[in-house]
Image (cartoon, helix red, strand yellow):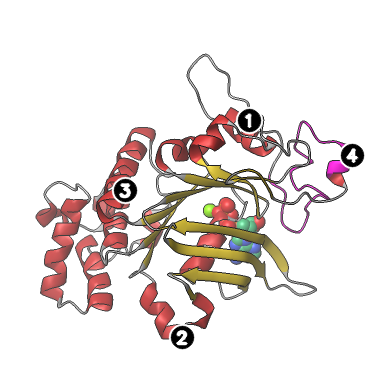
């Protein structure tokens, strides 16, 4: 038996709108086991961040979800507002893409880390600051006792993202939602920050939902992966299987758009992710799919298990090519 930590069960997410609410995520389901890194991959606008917001309990005022989200077997919607607040930043933490917009520019990074510990763990300011210095050391910031007094603008982008990681792990959360944690960084720094996150995840046996538009990033880091498109899961499998036997044309398109060396040309997927209020009939990828036939535009395919643990939402490539 795997030890399921997070269970997203048939979740759809809507924005309230006059004349009919707008569904931006459509019946997604996935489980994340304890100590697992689960990748969620898809182009911009596919519904990755809003899914993370639902799990974190920070959906915008004008949004809501249907379906169930369970954390440690407890349905989040059954918890009181106070209990939910107690989970956020404490048992479930989030790392955002842009540290500059999530860090407060007028407070030192040390104080911002300390604040998390004061709020959730009831530490005194002195103890919390001392712990912040240790955490800055954990995320490999040199001279942490000095840098603890820095303001965000005094740090590089890579350092700021390390501070965000320190804040996220301050309370030793069971689950970290990392939403494009390295997208804003250049490639070398990206690799360092991911390696750091990975090291911390292993040391504390945390679960991580690694959200990214870059399928290449999950290949080395995630155990299992779900490919999202237009608010749906199109394919999911353990990472090794997904890279060895990808079947959905969207997954294959994403794979072809990963740089593989100087001599292999990149083949981007033509066109754009459709807006949630303007989705094609039938398969939501059909208007960009090089293989689409008439029947693809008639009914939306179901997500079917094509081999153990490998799910696919495509009528043309229903079976894995084993
Ligand atoms: N505040 C909002 N109001 C209306 N639509 C929104 C809002 N935020 C996000 N959306 C829509 O929800 C969809 C999913 O967005 P998002 O989860 O941010 O995608 P991703 O993180 O995969 O790039 C998009 O179509 C986006 O336009
Ligand atoms: Mg996003």
- Mark closer to the observer (1, 4): 4
Q: Earlier in the sequence, mark 2 or mark 1?
A: 2
- Residues at circles 1 and 4 in contact by the CB criterion of under 8 Å: no
User: Is residue 156 at all visible to an observer of this figure?
Assistant: no
- Characterize the local packing of mark 3: few (<14), some (14-19) or many (20 or more) Cα atoms within 10 angstroms: many
Tell me the SS state at disc 2. Answer: loop
Disc 3 from disc 4: Cα separation: 45 Å
Query: Which residue corresponds to mark 1?
Result: 268
Query: Which residue corresponds to mark 2?
Result: 80
Q: Is residue 4 above or below residue 144?
A: below
State the quadrant of the N terminus: bottom left
Disc 2 from disc 1: Cα separation: 46 Å
User: Residue 286 lies in magenta, yes or no?
Assistant: yes
Magenta segment, prevailing SS (helix, strand or loop)? loop
Who is closer to the viewer here, 155 or 230?
A: 230
In the picture, measured across the screen, residue 268 lies left or right of residue 173, that is right
Q: Earlier in the sequence, mark 2 or mark 3?
A: 2
């Amino acid at each position: 038996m795997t030890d399921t930590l997070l269970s997203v069960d048939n979740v759809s997410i809507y924005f309230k709108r006059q004349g009919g609410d707008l569904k931006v995520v459509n019946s997604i389901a996935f489980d994340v086991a304890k100590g697992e890194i689960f990748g969620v991959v898809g182009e911009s606008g596919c519904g990755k961040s809003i899914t993370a917001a639902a799990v974190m309990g920070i959906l915008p005022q004008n949004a809501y979800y249907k379906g169930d989200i369970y954390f440690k077997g407890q349905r989040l919607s059954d918890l009181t507002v106070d209990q939910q607040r107690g989970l956020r930043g404490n048992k479930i933490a989030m790392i955002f893409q842009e540290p500059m917009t999530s860090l407060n520019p007028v407070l030192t990074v040390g104080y911002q880390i300390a604040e998390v510990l004061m709020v959730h763990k009831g530490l005194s300011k002195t103890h919390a600051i001392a712990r912040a210095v240790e955490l800055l050391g954990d995320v490999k910031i040199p001279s942490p006792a000095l840098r603890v007094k820095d303001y965000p603008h005094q740090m590089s982008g890579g350092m700021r993202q390390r501070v965000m990681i320190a804040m996220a792990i301050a309370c030793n959360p069971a689950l970290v939602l990392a939403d494009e944690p390295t997208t804003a960084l250049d490639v070398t720094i990206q690799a360092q920050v991911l390696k750091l996150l990975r090291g911390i995840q292993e040391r504390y046996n945390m679960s991580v939902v690694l959200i990214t538009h870059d399928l290449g990033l999950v290949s080395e880091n995630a155990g299992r992966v779900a490919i999202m498109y237009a608010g749906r899961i199109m394919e999911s499998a353990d990472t090794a299987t997904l890279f060895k036997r990808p079947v959905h044309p969207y997954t294959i398109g994403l794979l072809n758009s990963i740089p593989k060396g100087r001599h292999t040309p990149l083949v981007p997927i033509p066109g754009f992710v459709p807006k949630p209020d303007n989705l094609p009939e039938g398969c939501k990828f059909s208007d960009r799919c090089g293989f689409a036939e008439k029947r693809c535009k008639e009914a939306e395919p179901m997500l079917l298990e094509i081999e153990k643990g490998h799910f696919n939402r495509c009528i043309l490539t229903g079976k894995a090519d084993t």
